Amino acid sequence: MSDKKKLSIHTIQKMKANGEKIAWMTAYDYPTAEFAEAAGMEMLLVGDSLGMCVYGYKGTVPVTMDQCIVHCEAVRRGAPNTFVMGDMPFMSYQVSDEEAARNAGRFLKEADVDAIKLEGGQRVVSRIRAILDAGIVVCGHIGLTPQSSGQLGGHKAQGRTIASARALLEDALAIEEAGAQMLLLEAVPPEVAAFVVEKLSIPVFGIGAGPHTDGQLIIVSDVIGQFQAFTPKFVKKYANVAQVITDAMKAYVSEVKGGVFPADEHCYHMLKDEVGKFPELKADFE
């Protein structure tokens, strides 16, 4: 456990003003969060991407509030001094402002997160305001929004045409006007992301949005080479733990079948003054 001081929303805003980039990634469990905090990660998102990375779902839609809360609790325990953000899952905020505020509040009450994130632009403005009115820090999320990828025609980059870029900018401005304190852009051309950063006063982060944002988010399962189903264009793999883990498991299987493991050093032995009594014990059961 580190003794670093946890960021606040005010610290994050100051870092933007000073031009200091913020590094953050997703985390879904205690050990990953612990590693991230030790590595100096400034923020963690318990993303609904856990649906694919942890549960093996085809997408994020099946993820529930209860699942998100449980994983947020684990991440908070692993990273007590890191700014942790909970991700509002599909249908946790779409129905009404009241339900959005109630579910956002669960993240704080039950998992002690520092902020929540929700997808959508102009269509979720009233939800953002309701959550803010409850005293909760909000991060917007536009561009490629996985929960509504069906409407987008699949997991496709956004803002690649003038019409799409205009809609993206209008959404970004609406989110800031609603009072959200941060914005995440996903799968957006760098020039469009740079213009959004220029037009907004709040911190703007990117995942697949180029180098001009105020910081970068990445999926931990991608960056460490754990998730194998597909690799997005914007991912840089810094490790290949899938291969490391598979090799370790293969070696274990081989040694068990070959009688190599467990060796003597992996065994517990009887106390020295008890060893001589063992034949007598055996005799009692013959």
Image: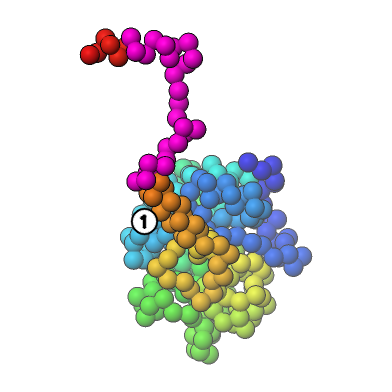
Q: Amino acid at mark 1?
A: Tyr
Residues packed near mark 1 inside 10 Å, few (<14), some (14 to 19) or many (20 plus): few
Residue for point 61% across, 81% down: 190
Residue for point 40% across, 46% down: 255
Q: Residue furthest bottom?
A: 162
Residue nearest the viewer, comparing 234 with 155: 234
Residue nearest the viewer, comparing 206 with 28: 28
Q: Quadrant of residue 14?
A: bottom right
Residue 260 lies, in percent from the top left, at: 42, 42
From which residue to which does the magenta span run? 256-280
If the image is split into quadrants, where does the N terminus sit? top right
Residue 4 lies, in percent from the top left, at: 70, 46
Asked whether residue 150 appears in the rendered view, the answer is: yes
Residue nearest the viewer, comparing 252 with 9: 252
Q: Is residue 104 toward the left or the right of residue 207 in the image?
A: left
Residue nearest the viewer, comparing 270 with 108: 270
Q: Which residue is mark 1?
A: 55
Instruction: Tell me if residue 228 comes above or below residue 154 in the rendering.
Output: above
Residue for point 48% across, 44% down: 73
Asked whether residue 196 appears in the rendered view, the answer is: no
Query: Would you say residue 159 sits in the magenta stretch?
Result: no
Q: Is residue 63 toward the left or the right of residue 181 in the image?
A: left
Residue 143 lies, in percent from the top left, at: 50, 75
Instruction: Tell me if residue 112 comes above or below residue 280 in the rendering.
Output: below
Residue 211 lies, in percent from the top left, at: 65, 75
Residue for point 48% across, 73% down: 232
